Image: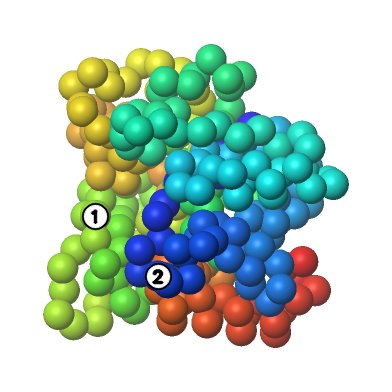
Amino acid sequence: QVVILAAGLGTRLRPLTTRTPKPLIKINGKPLLAYHIASLRRYGIEQIFIKTFYKNEHFQNFVNQPGYEDIRLIFEGERTLGTAGFLWEHTHLFDDELMIVYGDNFTNLDYGQFLGHFSHNPCDFGMAVFLTDHLANKGQVEFDKQDRVREIIEKPKMNISVTGFANGGIYYFRKQLLEEFQFRDHEECDFAKDFIPTLVNNGKLVRVYKMDETLIDIGTPEGLDRAENFARENSKEVN
């Protein structure tokens, strides 16, 4: 089962996102969310949930289209629990294995290789990372030679371009991990800022999958342009 997180406000893309939620912005004529769903289905993943908050009615209209009837929406109310906290409150919806995908990233990730990596390298929590020469304002991930995460520095403030591995916002774990976590110790629990660092500090085995594929945050006009160009130039691969 997969949960696509699509609850962001998209403030850096205004005024575009005053009318359209960020995951529904069209890239090369197709909503970003449609790319995610098509890619997941390509690898045989059919049980897809979408967590929404901003402009819920737009997502409802989206899944009402032919071909998306089996997609299930999970609406977030006014109380903000964070990305992990919200899923903890909804564990009754899930079976066992869970994958989380951040809906505001554009990627051509091979989900078969991603899941296969953690099948051959068992861990409590698996996450995708990608190499970048612009770590500023991204979640920096430090790990050892066995791909075991040692530290996550969420959006470090840097004045210069620094090369390193960043959090790709794609996770794999079993729902038991959510059930065991002490969420009541956190008013709000985000995966990157709270959940994963706590797992690491408590001795849980968190491993990375080093992406060779493309991942673009469309949260800025520059990122949106990059995604548009990539989709246009690689239309056979991403459609």
Q: Position of residue 87 (x, y in %)?
A: 44, 28
Location of residue 110 by image quarter: bottom right
Label 2: which secondary element:
loop
Amino acid bearing label 2:
Arg
Label 1: which secondary element:
loop
Judge the density around disc 2: few (<14), some (14-19), many (≥20) Cα neighbours within 10 Å: some
Q: Is residue 140 left or right of residue 53?
A: left
Q: What's the CA distance linking mark 1 and mark 2?
A: 24 Å
**Residue that carries the numbered disc 2 in the rendered image:** 14
Q: Judge whether 207 appears above or below 195 on screen.
A: below
Say which residue appears at 27% left-offset and 22% top-offset: 183
Query: In this view of the protein, which residue sits in the foreground, 79 or 119?
Result: 79
Judge the density around disc 1: few (<14), some (14-19), many (≥20) Cα neighbours within 10 Å: some
Spot the residue most to the right.
Answer: 66
Which color scheme does this rendered protein use? Answer: rainbow
Q: Judge whether 92 appears above or below 219 on screen.
A: above
Q: Is residue 159 left or right of residue 136?
A: left
Q: Is residue 23 left or right of residue 37?
A: left
Q: Is residue 117 left or right of residue 189?
A: right
Could you tell me if residue 48 is visible in this image? yes
**Residue that carries the numbered disc 1 in the rendered image:** 154
Q: Quarter of the image for the N terminus: give it.
A: top right
Location of residue 213 by image quarter: bottom right
Say which residue appears at 61% left-offset and 84% top-offset: 229
